[in-house]
Amino acid sequence: MQEYKSPYTVTERKIVKWCRYNARLDTYGRGCAHNCNYCYARHLLDFRGNWKPFEPAVADLATIHNAISDIKPGSVVKMGGMTDCFQPVEGKYHRTLETIKMLNDKKIHYLIVTKSATCCFPEYLDVYDPELAHFQISVTATDDYRGNKYETASPQSERIRAIETLQRLGFDTTLRLSPYIPQFVDTDTIKNIDCEKILIEFLKVNPHVMRCFDIDYYEYTEKFGGHLNLPLDRKIELAERFNGFKEHNVGEFVYSHYLYFRDNYNTNPFDCCNLRGITYSDYPEIDQDDRNQFTIFDYLESKEREQ
């Protein structure tokens, strides 16, 4: 077993720009059995031979404990930034389960981003603190067969059941439609999911992503940050399909699009993730330089070299 030596990372604000939550806690690294073919981490590490989907590096619990010892109570850490913290290896090592217990003791909020229904297993439901736990479960298609073509995480239908289970139990739960590819999503199926909150993140296209999906990319015409993106008017049209959710937000990569959705669509304009119990009264500060086009890959690559 290889040790993942830097499970806790605070990304530079100039990279994540208007994202509120730049503290990342990964219990596993350098590989993820979900092996999504469009994953930026896989693309980043695979060509150097550092992507081990079935033998991911495992963080040491003592290292995690030391890493979070200085985090202030009430802070938020994101779990599942570079790899899924509920990938199958969790069944053997339980690093995520034990980390959640530590975060509970420290009264630190944890934002779990996952494509795994494992997060609803009884041993986890028993330890989540409803005041600290926040869930974003990603759905990328409404058909299990299509979804299995490009990722090997829990089937889409199982993720939907997990969303509804967490919602029913009263946890802060968000249906994360990410990446949102309209050709893969039946709108009515999404609208009928029993969940109060939705977060929409549109597909960003680069040469690697373009090889991943059997779709026509002719609509992706707006260049920003080394990617092709849907134009704003098309995004607005697609987002409005989901206005029926009690709370709806769009998480945006393109700066001008972020401003539009912040001011005209998002239920919570101060926080794209719209976490329950976390209140802001102003917008994230964005310097002029941060509004320019950028790519996150150089930064992530430098972080991985530290491992």
Image: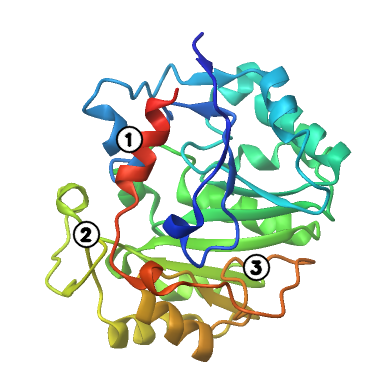
For marks 2 and 1, give the CA distance. Answer: 18 Å
Q: Earlier in the sequence, mark 3 or mark 2?
A: 3
Label 1 crowd bin: few (<14), some (14–19), many (20+), radius 10 Å: many
Q: Quadrant of the C terminus?
A: top left
Residue at screen point 11% across, 72% down: 218
Q: Could you tell whether 237 is left or right of 251 in the image?
A: left
Secondary structure under tag 3 reads loop
In the current view of this chain or complex, which residue is farthest to the top? 1
Q: Earlier in the sequence, mark 2 or mark 1?
A: 1
- The one of 176 and 253 positioned closer to us in this rendering: 253
Q: Circle 1 — which element?
A: helix
**Residue annotated with mark 2:** 226
Counting from the top left corner in percent of width and height, residue 183 is at 27, 67
Quadrant of residue 235 in the image?
bottom left
Q: Residue at x 43, y 86 (%)?
A: 260
| Front residue (pair 175, 85) | 85
Whether residue 34 can be seen here: no
Residue 67 or 91: which is nearer the viewer?
Answer: 67
Task: Name the residue type under label 1.
Answer: Arg
Which residue lies at the image location 72% right of the left edge and 18% below the top edge?
62
Residue indicated by mark 1: 42
Q: Tell me if 166 is positioned left or right of 245 in this view.
A: right
